[in-house]
Amino acid sequence: TSWTGLYMNANKSISWDQAVEEQKRIIKQYGEELTFEALSDMPVLHNCITEALRMHPPLILVLRYAKTSFEVTTKSGKSYTIPKGDVVAASPNFAHTLDYVFDDPLKYDPSRFAPPREEDKRTPLGFIGFGGGRHGCIGSNFAYLQIKTIWSHLMRNFEFELLDPVPEPDYESMVVGPKACRVRYTRRKLKV
């Protein structure tokens, strides 16, 4: 995702630099090839991706059809009945800014997903960047592997500099991406 690279470059000391060091470790341990094992051993990059998805999930609404009536109780204890046949909407954008799930939710902080914090586990389905429950995205693991492959290759072969602030979201397409911004890149080979 573009958001991953934009946020890592806008916050080099807390994400990009750590992710580059992780790449050096991966190359020493696994060699240059990006195997499944190597990609599965990248917790720093994984957390950077997850934080970017938390801040900018690709879909602004997740819709579900209620096959049976059910009760929902809010954090404050108020209960609601969702009737059979209604459509229920959940907003990852909203859910990911709840301050009882995520500390300082508007701040980019990939370490919020790392032990011992693991803020996304404070409540069931605290992170719904790929939906959740029985109908979560079947391709989420593949998506992480794909994004890790792309950013691993880029970090190993380029240095980036964000020339503009992190852009605003572009809500004019089905999948929410960033508006245009300028990034300077320089080819280089990562020294291990």
Image (cartoon, helix red, strand yellow):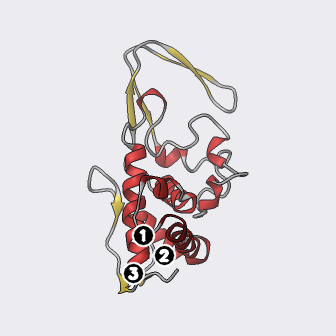
Mark toward the viewer: 2 or 3: 3
CA distance for labels 2 and 3: 12 Å
Q: Residue at x 27, y 56 (%)?
A: 172
Q: Which residue is mark 2?
A: 9
Look at the numbered disc 1 and give the secondary structure of its residue.
Answer: loop
The type of residue carrying mark 3 is Phe
Mark toward the viewer: 2 or 1: 1
Q: Position of residue 27 (x, y in %)?
A: 49, 70
The type of residue carrying mark 2 is Asn
Quadrant assignment for the N terminus: bottom left
Q: Position of residue 116 (x, y in %)?
A: 73, 51
Q: Residue at x 54, y 44 (%)?
A: 127
Question: Which label is found at residue 32?
Answer: 1
Question: Which label is found at residue 41?
Answer: none
The type of residue carrying mark 1 is Glu
Residue 81 against residue 171 in the figure, above or below: above
